[in-house]
Each structure stands twice: as structure tokens, then as C-alpha cells.
Image (cartoon, grey):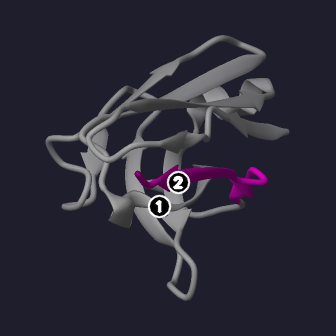
């Protein structure tokens, strides 16, 4: 089970932290990622972090967002700390668990809405 939280309405320039809990010991070995989908646009990768803690960011997230994770046997949590938010960051943010760099099943959360507006 994957459950996101933390979405909110925030003003431009503000900060927000998203959390995602991936329940199940298998997720200790999975890459955890954040994707987002804005209205009328395709879902896109924002950031991912491997089981070993190596992060990767989309160009739009570099310098503003930080991904991190806490690994516990039955509950793995991934965070996305977002700062200097812009209106173009408005989207539904989805948590994803996948076996990257290997192939296999991946899992999605239900999404959490982030709205950046004054």
C-alpha cells in the first residue's frame, strides 16, 4: 500500500513537504519516486531515490526540491521537500515504487494535490 500526504495550497515562493508511506518489507529494495501531473499534461518524473539513497532530479526540480527516504522493514517513507514553489509546480503529485534499475512491477499512490497560487 502506498499513501501520500502533505499536498496543500501554497503561495509562490513558499515551501511544502510531501510524504509517502510504502507499507511492506519489499519496498526497502525498491526505488521510490515522485511524479506529477498537471491538468492537460502528461505525468512526469520529479525525483527518485534508490534503495541505497542515490537521488535523481528532473531539471525542473534541481536546486529547489530535495528527495529523501527512511527505510524501515515494514514501512518505508519517502519525502519531497519543495521550496521556492512556482505556479507551474501546481499538479497532482504521485508516489511511485519501482524496481529501478531493474524491471518489474511498479506501484502507485492515489496522489496529493499541490496548488501554488497567490
- Asked which secondary structure carries label 2, the reply is strand
Is residue 95 visible to us here? Answer: no
Cβ–Cβ below 8 Å for labels 1 and 2? yes
Q: Nearer the viewer, residue 95 or 103?
A: 95
Q: Residue at x 36, y 32 (%)?
A: 15
Q: Residue at x 60, y 40 (%)?
A: 8
Asked whether residue 110 is drawn in magenta, I would say: yes
Q: Residue at x 50, y 47 (%)?
A: 33
- On the image, the x and y values in percent for residue 41 come to 50, 85
Residue extending furthest top?
Answer: 72
Q: Nearer the viewer, residue 23 or 86?
A: 86
Q: Quadrant of the N terminus?
A: top right
Q: Which residues are magenta?
A: 106-118
Which comes sooner in the sequence, label 1 or label 2? 1
- On the image, the x and y values in percent for residue 89 come to 39, 59
Q: Above or below — where is 20 with respect to 99?
A: above
Reading the image, the residue beneath label 2 is 115
Q: Above or below — where is 87 with respect to 12?
A: below
Q: Quadrant of residue 19?
A: top right
Residue 109 relative to residue 100: left or right: right
Q: Residue at x 76, y 24 (%)?
A: 25
Q: Please tell me the numbered disc located at residue 90.
A: 1
Residue extending furthest front?
Answer: 118
- On the image, the x and y values in percent for residue 72 come to 65, 11
Residue extending furthest bottom?
Answer: 40
Residue 29 relative to residue 22: left or right: left
Q: Above or below — where is 76 with respect to 22?
A: above
Is residue 87 visible to us here? Answer: yes
- Asked which secondary structure carries label 1, the reply is loop
Asked whether residue 115 is drawn in magenta, I would say: yes
The local crowd at label 2, few if under 14, some if 14 to 19, many if 20 or more residues have their Cα within 10 Å, is: many
Amino acid at each position: 500500500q502506498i499513501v501520500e500526504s502533505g499536498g496543500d495550497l501554497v503561495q509562490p515562493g513558499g515551501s511544502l513537504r510531501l510524504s509517502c508511506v510504502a507499507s511492506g518489507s519489499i519496498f526497502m529494495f525498491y526505488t521510490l519516486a515522485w511524479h506529477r501531473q498537471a491538468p492537460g499534461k502528461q505525468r512526469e518524473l520529479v525525483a527518485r531515490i534508490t534503495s541505497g539513497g542515490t537521488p535523481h532530479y528532473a531539471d525542473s526540480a534541481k536546486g529547489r526540491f530535495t528527495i529523501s527516504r527512511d527505510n524501515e522493514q515494514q514501512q518505508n517513507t519517502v519525502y519531497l521537500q519543495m521550496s521556492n514553489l512556482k505556479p507551474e509546480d501546481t499538479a497532482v503529485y504521485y508516489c511511485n515504487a519501482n524496481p529501478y534499475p531493474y524491471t518489474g512491477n511498479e506501484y502507485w499512490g492515489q496522489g496529493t494535490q499541490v496548488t501554488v497560487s497567490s
